[in-house]
Image: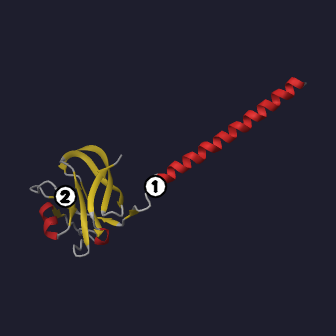
Amino acid sequence: MNISSFLIAVALVMGLAACGGKQSSESTTTESVQSNETPMEKEVAFTVAEKYFVKNDAPSLSDPKIETAEEFAEYFGSATVMGEDGKPTAIDFQTQYVIAVTKPATNVATELKPVSLVEDGEGNVTLSYSVEEGEAQSHSIKPTLIVIVGKSADGDVTVEEVE
């Protein structure tokens, strides 16, 4: 009986020690996650521009940030179609600018989708986007993503593809 009581006591002590160890590692994990946060980073509102296409004779985009209608017209044309929602999204370059991402021509159905737009508080704006590919097509497209941003979130712009 003494041996069984001893074994039960040892098992209880080991169980309590295991629980205490788990609590300690959880608090460490929480602290490390909190230390990785960047409190100055904030989400920026944007609108995806619809019904625009990359011109066949357009040069490669040297900068994803486009601040004037004239510069925008060098790269993009409007694709107006019939119907109520047939007009391209309006862009007011007095109060807005665009961030544009283009990919080389492909015959695979490809869609560029915005994931996030953040401003870091140091004059940097980052657009993250994903690429979704579909079936092969009988024609080529130049995948394009154009987002419209208010000039209140003005700064150096970078774009990054995420998976």
Report the number of discs: 2
Q: Which residue is mark 2?
A: 63
**CB within 8 Å, label 1 to label 2:** no
Residue drawn 31% across the image and 58% down it: 126
Counting from the top left corner in percent of width and height, residue 72 is at 16, 65
Q: How far, Cα to Cα, is label 1 from label 2?
A: 29 Å
The quadrant holding residue 55 is bottom left
Residue 162, above or below 13: below
Q: Could you tell me the amino acid type at mark 2?
A: Asp
The answer to which of marks 1 and 2 sits earlier in the sequence is: 1
Q: Is residue 59 left or right of residue 130?
A: left
Counting from the top left corner in percent of width and height, residue 81 is at 21, 66
Comparing 68 with 24, the one in front is 24
Q: Is residue 56 left or right of residue 121?
A: left
Evaluate whether residue 94 shows in this view.
yes
Q: Which residue is mark 1?
A: 37
Secondary structure of the residue carrying tag 1 is: loop
The quadrant holding residue 128 is bottom left
Comparing 52 with 71, the one in front is 71
Evaluate whether residue 146 shows in this view.
no
Q: Residues within 10 Å of mark 2 (few under 14, many from 20)?
A: few
Q: Which mark is residue 161?
A: none
Q: Residues within 10 Å of mark 1 (few under 14, many from 20)?
A: few
Counting from the top left corner in percent of width and height, residue 77 is at 15, 63
